[in-house]
Amino acid sequence: MSMHELARQVKESSLKLAAAGSELKNKALAQIAASLNGRQDEIIMANLADLERSKQENLAAPLLKRLFFNEAKIADAVDGINSLIGLDDPVGRTLLSTELDEGLELYKVTCPIGVIGVIFESRPDALVQIATLCLKSGNGVLLKGGAEAKETNRILAEVIVDAAAAAGIPANWAALLETRAEVSDMLKMDRYFDLIIPRGSNEFVRYIMDNSAIPVLGHADGICHCYVDAGADLEMALQIVVDSKTQYVAVCNATETLLVHEKIAPQFLPLLQRAMDEKKVELVGCPRTQVLIPVAPASEDDWKTEYLDYKLSIKVVSGLNEAVAHINKYGSGHTDTIITAEKERAARFMEYVDSGNVFWNCSTRFSDGFRYGFGAEVGIGTGKIHARGPVGLDGLVIYKYKLLGCGHVVEEYADRRKTFKHRNMHKEFSL
Amino acid sequence: MSMHELARQVKESSLKLAAAGSELKNKALAQIAASLNGRQDEIIMANLADLERSKQENLAAPLLKRLFFNEAKIADAVDGINSLIGLDDPVGRTLLSTELDEGLELYKVTCPIGVIGVIFESRPDALVQIATLCLKSGNGVLLKGGAEAKETNRILAEVIVDAAAAAGIPANWAALLETRAEVSDMLKMDRYFDLIIPRGSNEFVRYIMDNSAIPVLGHADGICHCYVDAGADLEMALQIVVDSKTQYVAVCNATETLLVHEKIAPQFLPLLQRAMDEKKVELVGCPRTQVLIPVAPASEDDWKTEYLDYKLSIKVVSGLNEAVAHINKYGSGHTDTIITAEKERAARFMEYVDSGNVFWNCSTRFSDGFRYGFGAEVGIGTGKIHARGPVGLDGLVIYKYKLLGCGHVVEEYADRRKTFKHRNMHKEFSL
């Protein structure tokens, strides 16, 4: 089938899926969970084939680890689907209800976005997560996974599509893409695709943005900061910085830069160095840091770098304003935390730092859809439009305005025979 | 000043403006309203100069009319500002509050988007409307108006910036652009601009989308439809179609295509023709229409054309499904209305038509920010992301997640010493 025809079919089905009720969608999700369990052996066999081939092709060990999809991973995916079933349907919520005039009622009601193109990394669990989030939110989806996981992705897509169809979901709401050429085609089809979600490196997300007129929900780097304010509890600050930097270094919500108030730096930095040495974290610092602890100099580039590694850059600042300015200049709008005992200073930090997630006295690592209680996430947005921060079901819907009249025409308002009331009805939409 | 420096300053100021309270913003709006009144003479003189020059340059009459900005228009603008003052602050609303665990509270709080670039048509009232909407929503803004209104725009921008500064709004939150080169520069500065709102022709909006990585909130055509269902009240249907088509033809929410159920077409179309003849509307129709009334044939192109004129294309359809399919194929996702006596059929139409505004028994011309009670609109979006339909203050904000802890680290949850509660607190954010 041509990519054009495939996209057309998914678009057409998505319009039907948009009208599917919560019960049907949840039934399909339960069916998918059951099929993942029932077809476990096929899935594990397919994954073994991917692992075998990838080993022969000398795929790097961390990538092999991500590719691995066994019984436990299937159980995790099933757990995820079950919690998704328990979440409220994001579609059909009334966001606004206004009586414009007698018998003329306006409702703003959530609805699916339409068709979403998702390009994701090697982890096969991502396919299950994204496809089921799209189903729950009533969106059609085209999925492109990593080539190294092709057998696993193929069987997973088959399981999902078959199970959904068996439950009564319109056919063709989801499909798997397998070639880069198909992705290139997709980026040009703004007629069929309403949103692209690329998950992968920074350069990759950038490439997608520069090569498509379709809106993109993606994140740039995660250059996250911890700012230790004057008068912070030293023990708490140490705990939070250590967790933010080292709990898992290869992820976007790990901290890359530590900012320290000049008043607390002489006490705090030696403690920090000891803790970081234990965790084998390489430190680089500004000249004022170097006066206090023996570290290599940080370059201008260090402030802009997402290490994703056991490395931390440190800057001593003259106060809250300089910390905020540094974050707004060098940060990536992802997640930044202040450690301070003073409420007013925490409030100022959270007000002025222009990031999607601004924290007080806790680790940047909390910035995550599961931890936020969203069930799962399709990604973390660092843009300022539509959705930012961890994006769950809410980011997969938009709304439409429904206006109910009984013969109302504008002419009567234009010539002032009638005037608008604009009364908030606080009412759910129903007919 | 270089465009780069100008954009940098507006960005910097926008971060301060984001933290401005409702009272300060409303005070500034009141000051702007007072200054527009106080400096009326200067504004009218500047507008006369624009009109004079534009006449000499043979500007078309409709454009001259749009350019005209007199005492009455100033009074309208002042009225608009006063109603804007009365609207709730869109910033600082708590959208979600979740207790993640004891002492660890997550809040999703609305905040301004940042810096918005707006490119608008010749009407000087658009400048006042957009600038004040941005101020109320805490956004920095760069404004580019039509060259024909340059003197009027210059004095209006001066009045707004001066009055806001006098009220205590950070300087440089708004500025006027005057050249196309500046606009080209702006489109490349995704570091400083968070959103571009182009108001103008379809080709123009398309050009902006194709030439910038900055998100664009704009609308394509307004190809709106009226669908007259079998069993519709003939009188009501006639009223609505006439209003939708002729109340004001040169606007995006005017209807371009009429779809009629085959069962009602023999009675309805002759009545319609008589009414349209009276209004001097040219009709074109499908072959089945031509059997019923003497009209010229509609071509494939007619279904895709935004006439913005006294012209209507007509198609007889076999039923609701064909009407919906036609709208989803040829429409532009703007506004479509069904005229029917049957609730279930209205519900189906509104569910399946993939447009931002779906109406039952009322005119497509209601699709408008003022009529919806939004105070004003920055534009009407036909995209599926962030905001669609008439976009008022709500479309100018996004949110940030604020997480308050007391030393919480992820490690304790990763090793299962602690588990998340995810309890909805139904609580406003405050510190």
Image: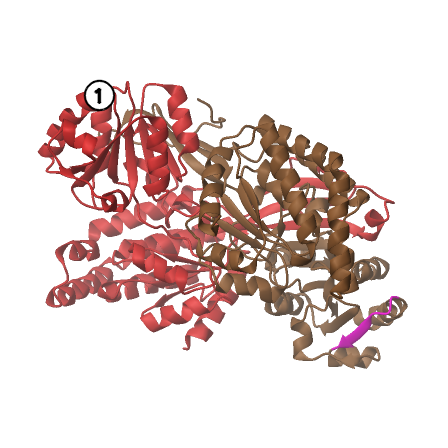
Chain colours: A brown, B red
Image location (x, y in percent) of residue B339: 30, 25
Depth check: B41 or B274 in front?
B274
- In percent of width and height, residue B399 lies at 57, 49
Residue A386 in sight from this viewpoint: yes
Highlighted magenta segment, given as a residue range: A279-285
Instruction: Classify B294 as above or below B161.
Output: above
User: How many C-alpha atoms fall within 10 Å of the one at disc 1: few (<14), some, or many (≥20)?
Assistant: many
Q: Secondary structure at mark 1?
A: helix
Can you say whether B341 is above or below A315 in the image? Answer: above
Q: In this view of the protein, which residue sits in the foreground, A361 or A196?
A: A196
- From what the image shows, is residue A39 above or below residue B415? above
Instruction: Determine which quarter of the picture holds residue B390.
Output: top left
Residue B251 x, y percent position in the rendering: 25, 45
Asked if residue A284 lies in the magenta stretch, the reply is yes
Residue at screen point 72% across, 59% down: A251
Q: Is residue A296 magenta?
A: no
B124 with respect to A189 (left or right): left
Which quarter of the image is occupied by the N terminus of chain B?
A: bottom left
Residue B271: x and y, percent?
14, 25
Query: Residue at image x 81%, y 41%?
Result: B419
> Which one is in front, A32 or B12?
A32
Q: Chain letter of disc 1?
A: B
Is A358 or B355 nearer to us in this picture? B355
Circle 1 sits on which residue?
B234
Q: Is residue A368 visible?
A: no
Say how many tags the image has: 1
Image check: A416 left or right of B4? left
Give the residue displayed 66% in from the left and 48% down from the top.
Answer: A153
Q: Amino acid at mark 1?
A: Leu
